Amino acid sequence: MRLSEIKAGVVGVGFIGVAHVEALRRLGVDVVGVVGSTPERAQAKADAANLPKVYDSVEALAADPKIDVIHIASPNYAHADQVRICLEAGKHVVCEKPLALNSADTEDLVARAAATGLVNAVCFNIRFYPNCHQAMALVADGTLGEPRFISGSYLQDWLLLETDWNWRLIPDEAGALRAVADIGSHWLDLVSFVSGRRIESVMADLHTLVPVRRHPAGPVETFAVTGDSEDLVSEEMSSDDAAGILLRFEGGARGVLAVSQVSAGRKNSVSFEVDGAKSSVSWFSEDPDRLLIGHRGRANEVMQRDPSLAAPQAAALIGYPGGHVEGYPDTFRALFGRVYADIANGGPAAEADYPTFADGHDIVQVTEAIARSSQEGRWVSIDRGEHS
């Protein structure tokens, strides 16, 4: 099957849902329908963003025999049930993170997907910047030596003010964790991918730095600004604005992560450094085409993203010549390109080259350990069980 023959649907018409539609259209995939929180909201967004047909419900979308694959980009609480509906209807599924709000549900979804033989993916798109794959290749081929220390941060400022608001601040919709689950999960997946090592245990300190927020009674779009002149409701907060997390990885490497959604001036700032026994590699999302390779006995290197110089794993993701910057929207195109290659082949490859439900399950287990560590003030190991 060719990509142009695959029919897709998208659940969610907010910022991320629209990003999914745009990336799929770039690949030549026919997006035939969308679902929103209500048909009226979905239609208004479809009119504004040139989205396709609006379906009344996830069930109606999944029941359409024309549709081969469904993307879940709805609020977190809905993911597990919506994924189940789509799998039961025989649809391949791409789900935004978190795959579900708890590891019992994510474990169930991994098993259900495996039983169906359908393609399943979690949208950890950050690892699909080409230079993140380049860094992974440097670790894998031994250029850095054995990884010893892994550090970095994911910082934003869109929830800095007490009047900043979004459904992600509502535990019933987003889950008990917020900054860690929303953006920290991306970093945890990214460094696990780059280093080739899973996280074994964590020591975390979570912070609610804006204890009371004032917000409109109705929904607020992600990254939207709320004005003081509006009629606002005050609400006490319980989820994390920021966190500091110590990490222990397989093989003995140690790490440290800073996560914040209240860091003024940081719009969407991801960074990591892997320090190996011989060299180091570091990357910064606001300058995504440059990779710094550090040395002890000779000059450091700055590697520019260039398909003619990149490792095969990175070159395969690059869509433009060197010097033509590729950014955040391109990560969705690169990720979906990998996923849809398997869909075109009729099912998942034996070794997926994209994050699957199993990866989503693993990161939920890590974030659960982070929450428990902060609550109990101690190191917590990730209990993956015999089947993980």
Image: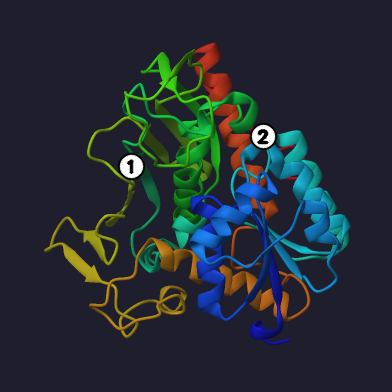
Q: Amino acid at mark 1?
A: Gly
Residue 90: which disc?
none
Q: Is residue 98 left or right of residue 264?
A: right
* Location of residue 75 by image quarter: top right
Marks 1/2: CA distance? 25 Å
Badge count: 2
Looking at the rendered image, the disc whose residue lies closer to the viewer, 1 or 2, is: 2
Q: Is residue 275 left or right of residue 71?
A: left
- Whether residue 387 is visible, yes or no, is no
Say above or below: 256 vs 2.
above
Q: Amino acid at mark 2?
A: Leu
Q: Position of residue 39 (x, y in %)?
A: 69, 50
Q: Nearer the viewer, residue 6 or 276?
A: 6
Q: Which quarter of the rendering shows the N terminus? A: bottom right
Residue at x 74% of width, y 43% of height = 80
Which residue is the site of mark 2? 101
- Whether residue 297 is visible, yes or no, is yes
Mark 2 crowd level (few <14, some 14–19, many ≥20, 10 Å Cα): many
Residue at x 54% of width, y 30% of height = 218
Which residue is the site of mark 1? 152
Say above or below: 14 vs 51.
above
Q: Which quarter of the rendering shows the C terminus? A: top right
